[in-house]
Amino acid sequence: MIGRGTSTYAFADRWLRLRLAQPPGSQPIVELPDWVDVIALTPGDRVVLVDQYRHGVAGVRTEFPAGTVDDAETPLTAARRELLEETGYAGARWYPIGSAAVCPAAQTNRIHCFLALDAHRTADPVPDAAEIIHARELPFTELLEQVQAARLELPALHLADLMWLQAFLRRSSDARLVRLRF
């Protein structure tokens, strides 16, 4: 029988908890909050991106706006908040396009991806104190070309977002979305 077994916490803070599972030698489990990613498209089919310094790779990376889901917050509410905080943009129409366990072997959280259409700037960005972020737009077709030609390296989870987006666009009968198919 597969069960949860017993475990103890080796570390815990506001961002993560590290659970050491039993029996000894079992893989540690990282308990994290759920995450959200937002593919935000303007009325002119430009994607809203953030260039953000990432300590893990010691450099600036281009990403979709993203962040964690706070306690008592729905993924959609978190996605709307993160888009506004990181970029100053708001979306007029929102669609959930995918959700999955991030790393079920070692992590407890899920990633939730949303498509925000008719995104437009409504405010100045208000990033968290520890974030170094610059928001920008790029034509959607240029984003796809750069990713496919390996001139732009998105995080792996954002590549999954593009797969979910592709599937969503193929199911849609909305003329605007059909035009974006890739």
Image (cartoon, rainbow, N blue to C red):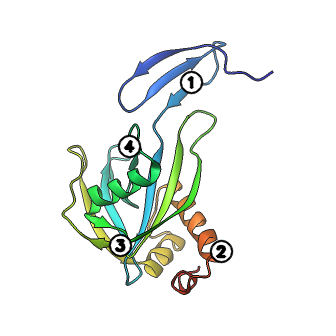
Q: Which mark is residue 92?
A: none
User: What kind of residue is marked 4?
Assistant: Gly
Which of the two discs, 2 and 4, labels the residue nearer the N terminus?
A: 4
Residue 134 at x, y percent in the picture: 25, 62
What residue sits right under mark 3 in the picture?
Answer: 119
Please name the residue that numbered disc 1 is placed on.
28
Spatial CA span between label 1 and label 2: 39 Å
Give the CA distance from mark 4 to mark 3. 29 Å
Residue tagged by mark 2? 171
Residue at disc 2, secondary structure: helix
**Residue lying at 46% horizontally and 62% vertically, measured from the top left:** 153
Task: Nearest to the eye among marks 4 and 1: give it.
Answer: 1
Q: Do labels 4 and 3 touch, CB within 8 Å?
A: no
Q: Quadrant of the C terminus?
A: bottom right
Point out the tag, 4 or 3, that comes first from the N-terminus.
Answer: 4
Q: How crowded is the residue under tag 3: few (<14 C-alpha within 10 Å), some, or many (20+)?
A: many
